[in-house]
Amino acid sequence: MIKTMKFLKYFSLAAVALLAFSCHKEDKTFAAPAEEVGNPILNPHADVVVDETTLGNNVTFTWSEVDYGYHAQVTYSLFAVYNSNEVQLGQSFTTSYTMTKEALNNLLVDEKGLAAPVGEAVAVELYVTSSISSNSPSYVKTSEKISVKVTTIAATTAPWIRRNIQVPGSYQGWAPADAPLLWETGEDSYTYSGLVNLIDPAAADATAQVEFKFTVNGGWEVNLGGSVDSMTPGGDNLKVDPGIYWIVVKANEDFTSGSVTLKKAGAISVIGDAVGGWELANDLKLVCTDNNAQVWSGVCDNCLGGGFKFRLTGGDFESNPWEMNWGGPMEHLVSNGDNISTNLTGSVKFSINFRGDVPALAQDATNPSPYFATVEKAE
C-alpha cells in the first residue's frame, strides 16, 4: 500500500473589520491539446548505497520539464516500484525531488512500503508523473521507468508507517495518483481522515453533486464506493453536494469493505490574537485551495502578532466551531493542540496543509501528525 486571551485590549472593532483575507488567482488560461503535451523524462541515477554513516546524505532525482502550452503550475509525483508494491516517494513543483538516504531506505524496506529485502542491492524501478489543475486525466503524463540499485539496511523508524488512501473524483479529473489524501489515524487503525475540497472548479452547474471514490496505491486496482454505510469494492461512485468536507473512512484490513462519514464545513479559519481576537463573530477564513495539494492559504492584511489556531467553521460545525481545531507545533499540527504563536505583523500569509509529507513521516520514529502550517510575510 502506499503505504500524516486577549492580546490587544484596546483594539477597536472598526480595526477588526478591516482585517481580511484575500486570494489572488491568475487569469484563466488554457492548456494545449493533451495529445500535444509530451511526457516527462526521468533522468538516469547512479546506484545508491545506504549505511549508518550516510543516512543524512541527500539523494536527488531529476526529470525534464513538461510544457502544457502556458505558464501552468505543474505538479510532479515521483514513484518507486518493487515486485508488485508501489510507493510515492514525494511530490514537487519543480523538476527535481530531494530526500535523505534514510527516508528512501525506510520507504523501500518497510513491510507497508515496498517490502524490499534488507541488506541487499535491490533493483528498484522509478517513474515520475506530471499533472495540472485540469478535469481531464489525459493531462496526467507518465515517464518511462528507470532502474536504480539501492543497497538497503534495516529501517530506522518505528515499526509502522502512517498509511494514506486517495480520494479521486469528478472534481479533480479522476486521477488517483494526484488525488487528495486521507491519513491513517493510528497504527493498524484502518481509519483514515482528512479535509478535502469537494468542489469542481470547472462545473457548468456549481450546485451539481460531486462524485468520488476511495483508492489505494495511486491506481484503480483497489477502490471502494457504493453506500456510505457499507462500501464495497468497485461500488458505484459516492455523491455529495459541493463543499469542503472533513472525511473519515473506516475500512477493514484488506480494504474490501468500509464506511465513510462526511461533515461539511463552511471554511477552514484562523482565529486568535494574531488576527484580532478569540471572540470574533466572523473569524477570518482561508478560502483558497488547490484540490490536489489540500493546501488552504490566505493573507491577513493587518496581522497583529500573537497566538492563533486553525478550525473548521460553518456548515455542520456551525453549532460547535471548536469541534475540529488544530494547534501545537506548526510542523506537526494536532487536533486540540496548543495555541500557535507568530511574531510577524502587517501583511501575513497563513497556510495549512492537510496533504502531509510522506518521506518526513517515514523517517520520524514518533509517527507524527502529517498536517502542518506555515506563516510568512506576504509578498
Image (cartoon, rainbow, N blue to C red):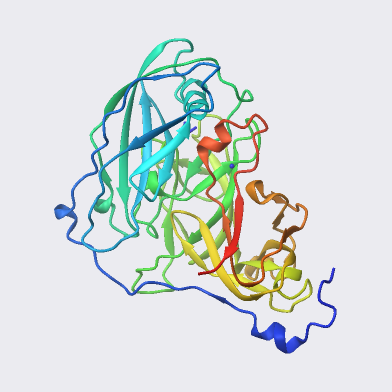
Classify residue 286 by image quadrant.
bottom right
Residue 306: horizontal and vertical position, in percent? 75, 66
Q: Residue at x 76, y 70 (%)?
A: 273
All told, the count of numbered labels is 0
Residue visible at 18% across and 48% down in the picture: 38
Q: Please, is residue 26 above or below residue 263 in the view?
A: below
- Residue name at image x 52 percent, y 49 percent: 355
Relative vertical location of residue 119 with respect to residue 207 in this rendering, above or below: above
Near-viewer residue (51 or 247): 51
48 or 152: nearer the viewer:
48
Left or right of 6? Residue 358 is: left
Residue 296 visible within the image: yes
Up/down of 274 relative to 84, above or below: below
Q: Position of residue 249 (x, y in %)?
A: 57, 45
Rendered view: 126 above or below 350: above
| Residue 248 in view here | no
**Residue placed farthest to the top in the image?**
119
> Left or right: where does residue 51 sit relative to residue 142?
right
Q: Residue 122 occupies which quadrant of the picture?
A: top left
Q: Position of residue 60 (x, y in %)?
A: 39, 34
Q: Nearer the viewer, residue 45 or 228?
A: 45
